[in-house]
Amino acid sequence: MKYIDFKIKDLSEIFNAKIIGDNDLRITGINDIENAKEGDITFLSNIKYLKYLETTKASAVIIGKDTKVPNNIKATIILVDDPYSTFGIILSEIEKKSISNKIGVEKPSFINKNSQLGDNIYVGAFSYVSENVSIGNNSKIFPYTYIGENCKIGSNTIIYPGVKIYKSTEVGDNCIIHANSVIGSDGFGFAPTENKGYITIPQVGNVIIKNNVSIGSNTVIDRATLNSTLIEDGVKLDNLIQIAHNVIIGKNTVIAAQSGISGSTSIGENSMLGGQVGIAGHLKMGDNIKYAAKTGVSKNMKSNQTLIGYPALTKDKYIKSYIIFKKLPVIEEKIKRLEEKLYNLQ
């Protein structure tokens, strides 16, 4: 439960919402509809939770404008266009307020004299800020963070504990990088030698992360061999993701946990990758592609389609194929019986 303090009428002004009930109701907490208590605000976006409207103890409920609200509801109702996103925005603002109070440089920490820090920033204890680093206004660097030389961190960006950002990395405004992620490590570049060994190919590029990007915990983004590994505006990365060198992730793409993108592959805009998706190297993927969980891609793909399976098939082809291969045990039995009959005839 999050503890907050605001009046319901403030929401109506922000979200252009219609209020049914007490305009002056003061909200002191936020919770889900099943566990909410008096003073809490909650939301209803999935019709299967409609039954909880009559039993919830929440003082206020955010509901879609098209939802039919029973007449016997005690809670104050806030009617909005999209209850889920509205609730998400409220949670985001609460989180920002709790972090915005953190200002100053804690000790012990090291900040190189040639680095530039913006206004209202926070640097947590045991952090290390290298030479020629710039950090924008209102950004928060939590403890045990390392920022290498020549890095640029934008404004209103949050870097959680233990993040390691290698040299020359650029991070935009309004980004979030969660704990223990590594940005700008070496790309996996090795060339075989005549004696069956390998020599390392130096990775001298960098990583550029644009604005409004969210990166989950323990995610790794490798720097490019020569140019830049690029994460475009609005990209959302889950925990435990591997982004290899020279990869480009298009705007507003969402990638779920344990996925891996091999080197020099570009992912189109507005794509959605399920968990454990694997994409081979040097591929060009179109925009608006949905990748089902565990999909494996080994060739270029066009825009506006859904991919399933390994090797990846379009949704229509996968469904047709599935109808056949789920019957393979029955087909095998029929073939065995036919073989027996042929043998007996001989």
Image (tube, rainbow, N blue to C red):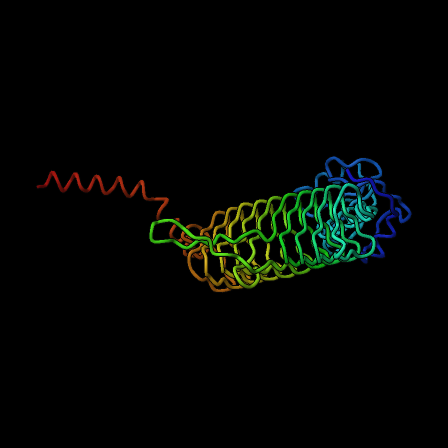
**317 or 275, nearer to the observer:** 275
Q: Nearer the viewer, residue 244 or 1?
A: 244
- Do we see residue 251 in this rendering? yes
Residue 36 spot, x, y in % from top left? 77, 37
How many marks the image carries: the answer is 0
- Relative placement, left or right, of 209 versus 107 is left
**x, y percentage for residue 43?**
74, 45
Residue 280 percent coordinates (x, y): 45, 55
Q: Eyeballing the image, is 122 above or below 31? A: below
Horizontal side of 264 relative to 146 (left or right) equals left
User: Is residue 229 positioned above or below 111 on the image?
Assistant: below
Say left or right for 162 vs 199.
right
Give the position of the C terminus as an image quadrant.
top left
Q: Quadrant of the N terminus?
A: top right
Residue at 38% of width from left, 52% of height from top? 321
Residue 72 visible in the current orientation = no
> Who's the residue at 63% across and 43% down the image?
180
- For the point 81% across and 49% down, which residue is it? 100
In which quadrant of the rendered view does residue 56 lie? top right
x, y (%) of residue 90? 78, 49
Residue lying at the far left in this picture: please name it: 346
List the single residue furthest toward the front. 113
